[in-house]
Image (cartoon, rainbow, N blue to C red):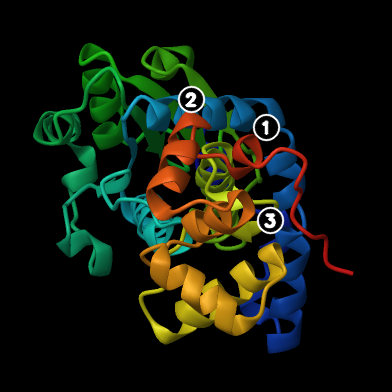
Amino acid sequence: MTLDPRITERRNPRTANIDLASPHEIVDLMNAEDRSVPDAVATQRDQIAQVIALTEDAFRRGGRLFYVGAGTSGRLGILDASECPPTFGSDPEMVQGIIAGGFPAILRAQEGAEDSPAGGAATMDEHDVNERDLVVGVAASGTTPFVHGALARARERRARTAFVACTPLAPHLLANVDVAIIAIVGPEVVTGSTRLKAGTATKMVLNMITTGAMIRIGKTYGNLMVDLRATNAKLVDRSERIVAEVCGVSREEARALLVDADKSVKTAIVMQKLGVDRERALQALAAGGGVIRRVIAGAPPPVPT
C-alpha cells in the first residue's frame, strides 16, 4: 500500500495479523492501542485551553459554538452539541453540530457530501455565522473539503475558528484557523477506521471544550450541575438532591425552593443563600456573570467525603 501522508490512513504494524486473532486477542490489541489516546490528547493541553477560552468568549458575547464535520467527526460534533442542553440547561442554539450531507448523514453515509467545500461554505451562510461565533472544524484526517470550505467562509464572516484533527496538517490547511488541536493517536487498529482511536480522541477533546466553557460561564457550582431544570423524574430527583446538599436543607425544603425558583437549581441556591426572592436572585446572578461563587462570597459548595 502506498504510504499516505495522513497518519490516520496508514497501516498499523501491531495489528497486521488481527484477522487471525481470537476474540480475547482482539480485545487485548484494541485495548493496548486505546491506552495511547489520553496521552495524545494531553499533548494538546494548551491548545484545548485556548479553544475553551474562545468558546467562553463566544458564549458571553451571545455567540454560538459550531462543530463542522463529516462522517464520524460530524456525528461526534452533533453528539456533543445535543448533550449540552440536558447537562447544562443551555439553549439548543448555543452549541450546534453540522454534518456534511445534513440530517440523513447522521444515520447513513452520504457519499460525496464531504468533498464539497462549497457545501461547507453554504452552511455558514445558512446559519448566519458572525463575529460573535466560534466555528470548530472536526476532521480526523485533517483534509475534508467540506470542513475547510466551512472554515474559510466562517473567517470571511469574521467568526473565530479552530480545528480538531489527528494527523499533522499542511500549513495551507491552517490558513483559516486561529487554533489547531492535533492529537496524533497513530494508525488505527483497522486501517483508516477513524471511529476508533481518532474518534475516541475527538470525543475527549470535544467533551473538554464544551464542559470547560460551560463551567467557565457558571453552569456548575463546584462539580455540581446547577444550571439544569427539573423537567423529568430523574432531573427532579437530582435537582432536589443538589439543592438539599448545597443549602443544607431537607428534601421538602429543597422542593419548595425549586417551586419558587421556577425549577431552576441555580436560582434556588442563590435564593436560599442570600435570603432573597427569585427576581433578586436572578439580578444577582446576572451581575455575577452567571457564576454562583461570584454571587455567594465565602460559601464554597460542600466537598463529598
Q: Report the residue at 30% width, 50% height from top.
A: 91
Report the residue at 11% width, 29% height from top.
125
Task: Choose between 11 and 41: the one closer to the eye.
Answer: 41
Nearer to us of marks 3 and 2 is: 3
Residue 52 on image: x %, y %: 55, 32
Q: Dividing the picture into quarters, in which one does residue 132 lie?
A: top left
Using the image, tell me which numbered label, if any, was put on residue 54: 2
Circle 1 SS class: loop
Is 24 situated above or below 194?
A: below
Amino acid identity at mark 1: Gln
Q: Is residue 77 above or below residue 216?
A: below
Q: Are marks 3 and 2 in contact (CB under 8 Å)?
A: no
Q: Which residue is mark 1?
A: 44
Q: Is residue 129 left or right of residue 251?
A: left
Amino acid of disc 3: Asn
Is 76 left, or right, of 238 in this rendering? Answer: left
Per the image, label 2 sits on a secondary structure element best described as: helix
Residue 4 in view (yes/no): no
Q: Position of residue 103 (x, y in %)?
A: 17, 59
Q: Which residue is mark 3?
A: 223
Residue found 48% across the figure and 55% down from its top: 267
Instruction: Give the residue type at disc 2.
Output: Leu
Q: Residues within 10 Å of mark 1 (few under 14, many from 20)?
A: some
In 3D space, how far apart are the residues under numbered discs 1 and 3 (Cα atoms)? 23 Å
Residue 275 is labelled as none
Of badges 2 and 1, the one in the foreground is 2
Could you tell which of marks 2 and 1 lies nearer the N-terminus?
1
The one nearer the camera, 140 or 92, is 92
Marks 3 and 2, how far apart in space? 22 Å
